[in-house]
Image: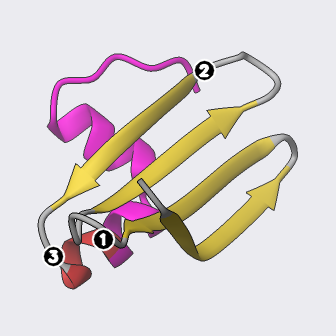
């Protein structure tokens, strides 16, 4: 698989990236919190959802029922 990073932001040890799998066309948001060690990935269905998940990854994780330490 070849992933392409479309967007990235980081602040105070929290790293959020929007990535695209060129082979499958899937979009995902990856989150890594260096302070707590929490990490998760959200596969998203379309560009609009991807952008919202990139901006609000913990809200999307909660909506999906993922328990993550913030």
Sequence-earlier tag: 1 or 2: 2
Tell me, what colour scheme is on the image?
A: secondary structure
Relative to residue 33, is residue 9 depicted above or below? below
The circle on residue 46 is 3
Q: Secondary structure at mark 2?
A: loop
Q: Are marks 1 and 3 in contact (CB under 8 Å)?
A: yes
Judged left or right of residue 16, residue 43 is: left
Judged left or right of residue 12, residue 30 is: left
Dot 1, how many residues are within 10 Å of its Cα: few (below 14), some (14-19), or many (20+)?
many
Sequence-earlier tag: 2 or 3: 2
- Where in the figure is residue 19, as x and y percent of width and height? 47, 65
In the image shown, does 41 or 54 lie closer to the viewer?
Answer: 41
Q: Are marks 2 and 3 in contact (CB under 8 Å)?
A: no
The circle on residue 50 is 1
Q: Which residue is found at the position 73% from the left and 16% from the top?
A: 36
Q: Secondary structure at mark 1?
A: helix
Say which quarter of the image contains residue 32.
Answer: top right
Say whether residue 21 is magenta: no
Say whether residue 59 is magenta: yes
Q: Which residue is found at the position 66% from the left and 69% from the top?
A: 8
Dot 2, how many residues are within 10 Å of its Cα: few (below 14), some (14-19), or many (20+)?
some
Frontmost of labels 2 and 3 is 3
Q: Which residue is found at the position 26% from the left and 33% from the top?
A: 62
Say which quarter of the image contains residue 64.
Answer: top left
The residue where tag 2 is placed is 38
Q: Secondary structure at mark 3?
A: loop
Judged left or right of residue 50, residue 45 is: left
Distance Cα–Cα, label 1 vs label 3: 6 Å
Which residue range is magenta in the image? 51-70
Decide whether the magenta segment is chiefly helix, strand or loop.
Answer: helix
In the image shown, does 25 or 31 lie closer to the viewer?
Answer: 25
The circle on residue 70 is none
């Amino acid at each position: 698989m070849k992933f392409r990073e479309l967007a990235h932001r980081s602040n105070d040890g929290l790293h959020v990236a929007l990535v695209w799998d060129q082979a499958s066309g899937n979009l995902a948001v990856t989150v890594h919190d260096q302070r707590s060690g929490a990490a998760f990935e959200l596969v998203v269905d379309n560009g609009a959802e991807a952008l919202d998940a990139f901006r609000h990854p913990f809200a999307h994780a909660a909506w999906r029922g993922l328990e993550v330490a913030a």
